Image: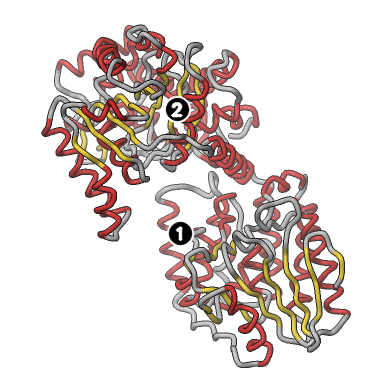
Amino acid sequence: MSNYTHFNLSFDDAGVAWLSMDTAGRSVNVLAQEVMSELIAVVDEVSNRAPSGFVFSSAKKRGFIFGADVNEFELFRTASDVEAHIAEVLHCFAAIESLDCPSVILIDGICVGGGLELALAFDRIISIDDATCQFGFPEINLGLLPGYGGSVRALERMGAEAAMKLVLHGRFLKVREAFDANVVDKLVSSREELAGAARDAIAGTISRRPAPESSNMAAVIADERAALMARTSPRNTPAPFGILDHYSVSEFNRNNMMKAETKLFSELMMTPASAGMRRNFQLTDAVKKGGRGDHEISHVHVIGAGTMGGDIAAVAAMNGFEVTLQDISADAIDRAIERARTLYERRLKAPQKVEAAMSRLRADAGGEGLAGADLLIEAVAEDLAIKKAVFADAEGKMKPGAIMATNTSAIPLEDIGAALTDPARLIGMHFFNPVPVLPLVEVVYTDASNSSFVDRAMYVCGALKKLPVRCKSAPGFLVNRALLPYMFKAVEAMLDGADPDRIDQALVGFGMPMGPIELCDQVGIDVCLGAGKVTGMSAQVAARFTAMIDAGNLGRKSGAGFYEWDGKKAVRPRGSYDQHELDAIAADMLAPLVAECRDAVAEGVVDSADVADAACIFGIGFPAFRGGPLFWDESGSA
């Protein structure tokens, strides 16, 4: 047996080389550069010893190979640096392909990115038939495509259309889907059967499955391009358009496509979009880690069965918490529970899972659940007096050590906590609407808040599959503090004569989900006015909002606001404008958002620029390919 840091190589009596991967110092296998360099050396040794077969497996208990180490991408300064690295890996994978013996790879978990590219270099791919096994190329989420020959080898195994869609969309295939798509040659029922299947493959009794014939790729690519152009542009996100061009070859030539893949990957790595998306990946990972821990919560009591409160309760029950839902209106509770059933049928699908979740969500009009609850989440009207009354009443009914959380979107917690005998119990858990869809939760604290309560609330958010960020109590916290001045500036510009469609088109072109004028309508003019009274707004904007409310024009929910609404769609011209003009408008409109984020960091409302950027991406929909408002502003990107 040879000695390696990340691999174990041995040869059996039949001359078969058995190689297992066990990345040192990590819980999962990752193709970091050090690991890849060692793999190159291992493959050289295997080639030199001319084995009768070559079998690759994982020695980890969890997963197979999770791809490259994204953090190391920042080490590459130029496209030439990237190309030089890729050339070494391509040589290694080609050496595996050219072995004068059968090669077999055994999959027992997640096999994505560079891990799948490695697998595709083997003659036979064998996997256990288990839900833990998934296959895919997530590189598109980093503004890239596979760079180790994966786009080409996937085409050879799966056919052009299936390969292109796997690369373009980044969706993972479950093991049965992977088998049906010809990614996998053989399924076995357990890990214990893998070694025997490898021997069968070496003996020739397990064949490689032929790739399906390609369909009309030109038509498929045209449809994909049209769908892309409806939501983005090559200027903002070059990777998907580059992938479509990559697969738009009239005749397949392996060598040419390998070279084209390397060139495209290297160029994309240097784009601002990829830099922003890689930062988004790192922010997401960091925020997820902040939500991991023992929350010690089993029973959640929610007061307020409106859209927000009802959906918070539904999501909590869906994720395993016992939930009691209180409201002064029994009808509101009933409606919330019916909405929960609809959510569960859509998300959980299996009837037994739906009924299990429903059994955890209980109507509690009288509030009896307060006494046994570990966590209270208040989601009543955004009115300080009402909230203070709710908490003053709840404090005397809840057990010692239970956490009291408000879902307020902007009211300083100190004002609400004034109603409590022990304000240390009060924290904020600000969810975003729609709760089942939007991932961010601002976990808000004051100088008086029990720090362990803040930690546990973060962990609850993680258990709810949310992305929690810590915010110090201040008007608007982080998201509304940043978002509202941006919206109000756009309204001011419109009131001063600017074309609202031009403003909205500028920000949509920038990458925002919708423009700020349309967003006011979407949020509701009455809600904008109420939030603006907390965070501040000009008299001009307040007067316009008030006049619109008096006229019954509340935005989308009333059918008219700044725009007329056709159901869920604002009726606006969506004109075509000069790009330089739109860029200038976007930068001008976003200036207050960037400034508020910078001030929030300076004032300690959030811990870092990373947190501010993450909150804006996850809570506002600031485009991920921009990397967050502060990252975008500091990078000087257009």
Q: State the mark number for residue 442.
A: 2
x and y percentages locating residue 479 in the rendered image: 44, 25
- In the shown orientation, is residue 358 left or right of residue 44? left
Q: State the quadrant of the C terminus.
A: top right
Single out the mark in the foreground, 1 or 2: 2
As displayed, is residue 439 above or below residue 60?
above
Q: Quadrant of residue 508?
A: top left
Task: Look at the image and tell me whether residue 530 can be seen.
Answer: no
- In the shown orientation, is residue 165 left or right of residue 147? left
Label 2 crowd bin: few (<14), some (14–19), many (20+), radius 10 Å: many
Q: State the mark number for residue 435.
A: none
Question: Upstream in the sequence, badge 1 or badge 2?
Answer: 1
Please tell me whether mark 1 sits on a helix, a strand or a loop. Answer: helix
Q: CA distance from mark 1 to mark 2?
A: 37 Å
Q: State the mark number for residue 225.
A: 1
At a point 35% along the width and 12% down the height, the residue shown is 416
Please tell me whether mark 2 sits on a helix, a strand or a loop. Answer: strand
Along the line of sight, which residue is nearer the eye, 268 or 527? Answer: 527
